[in-house]
Structure formats: C-alpha cells, structure tokens
Image: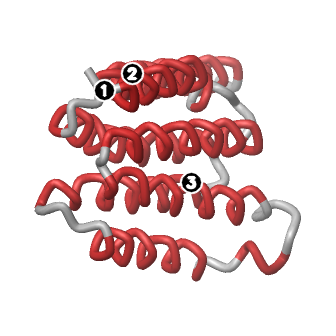
Amino acid sequence: MKPSYLIAQGIGIAAILLAYFVYTTRSRKILITLKFLTDLLWGLHYFLLGAFSGALMNVVNMAREVIFQQKSSKKWAKSPLWAVVFVIMSLVSTLISWQGPISLLPALGSSIAVVGLWCSDTAHIRAFSFPGVSLWLIYSILTHSYTHMISNLITLLSIAVGIIRDIREKKQSQLKHT
C-alpha cells in the first residue's frame, strides 16, 4: 500500500470527525465554516488518491464557501449571480480534470450543494445537500475512498437528524399556536 494512500485515509479520518457537525448546527455561519474545513481536507484526500476531479471540485467548493460566508454581511456577496458562477466553475473544473463520466458525479453533487448553501435557512441547505452528498457517495465508492464513503454516510445521517429535528420543532411550534 502506498504511503500517499495511507496519508489520504488519515486525512479522511480527520474530515470525518468534522463531517457530522456540518449539517447538525443551527448556525449558517458555523455550517459554512465547517464545510470549508471539511472540503479542504477532502481536497487533499482526493489529490493524494489521484482522483483529481474530486480534488479540484473541493477547491471550487472552498472558494464557494468563502464567498457564501460573506453573504450575510457584504452587499457584493448577496448577488444570486454567485450561485451561477459556482455552478459554472464546477462544470469548468470538471472539463479541466476530466477522468471520464465519473467526473460528472462530484460536479453534479457540488452544483446541487451550491443551490443549497446559497439558501439562508439551514433547513433548505439540508434539503438540497442530501442529493448532493448522495452523488459524492457514489463517487467515493468508485474512487475507493473508504473514509469518504463513511463520511458521506455520516453526513447523510446528520442531514436526516437535522431534518427530523426541524420537522419535530415545527410540529411543536404549530401545537403551541393552536
């Protein structure tokens, strides 16, 4: 087994430790900060595995999170054109790093995430993230990224927990107002 593979899996374990907390937080700012950190780790992970579409897509995702983090405080970052820019960047990075049809999976997953992360409401972020993470799960299976497979499963679980919590809180709120 190559040392780069072992290092990649070690980085993946660190990313897993952060992954659960990304979608369970109620704070959009914390969610996007944690997402940036996990994307940094996954970018390094995929680079070491030689899965360059996944690596480059994570770089695009990090840039996306830097801009989206500014959305609540900077007027220039509020333009919906940013979402379009990052979808286009996802598609361009796919062309640059093309490794066959497998390269479409992270591009589509990240494009769906762009729409979700653009939303201000964490419930909407979770709803869009579920299909996006599912596409990344398929990519991680096909690239033999065992730690990212585990992370994607944990992330899907954390999204489900967050969605269930939102539904329960909404029902409790409706009961209080009736």
- Compare residues 66 and 72 and report the one nearer the observer: 66
Residue 77, image x and y in percent? 75, 73
Compared with 163, 65 (above or below) is below
Res. 124 visible in picture = yes
Nearer the N terminus, badge 3 or badge 2?
2
Residue 90, image x and y in percent? 40, 69
Q: Amino acid at mark 2?
A: Leu
Contact, mark 2 vs mark 1 (Cβ under 8 Å): yes
Compared with 134, 164 (above or below) is above
- Identify the disc placed on residue 19: none
- Identify the disc placed on residue 6: 2
User: Farthest residue toward the right?
Assistant: 73
Disc 3 on helix, strand or loop? helix
Residue 54, image x and y in percent? 35, 51
- Compare residues 15 and 47 and report the one nearer the observer: 47
Query: Which quadrant is home to the N terminus?
Result: top left
Q: Is residue 23 left or right of residue 107?
A: right
Q: Amino acid at mark 3?
A: Leu
Q: Amino acid at mark 1?
A: Lys
Q: Mark 3 packing: few (<14 Cα in 10 Å), some, or many (20+)?
A: many
- Identify the disc placed on residue 117: 3
Contact, mark 1 vs mark 3 (Cβ under 8 Å): no
Mark 3 and mark 2: span between their CA atoms? 31 Å
Can you tell which quarter of the image residue 123 is in?
Answer: top right
Q: What residue is rendered at 36% in x and 78% in y?
A: 92
Nearer the N terminus, badge 1 or badge 3?
1
**Residue under numbered circle 1:** 2
Q: What residue is rendered at 23% in x and 42% in y?
A: 139
Residue 38, image x and y in percent? 57, 36
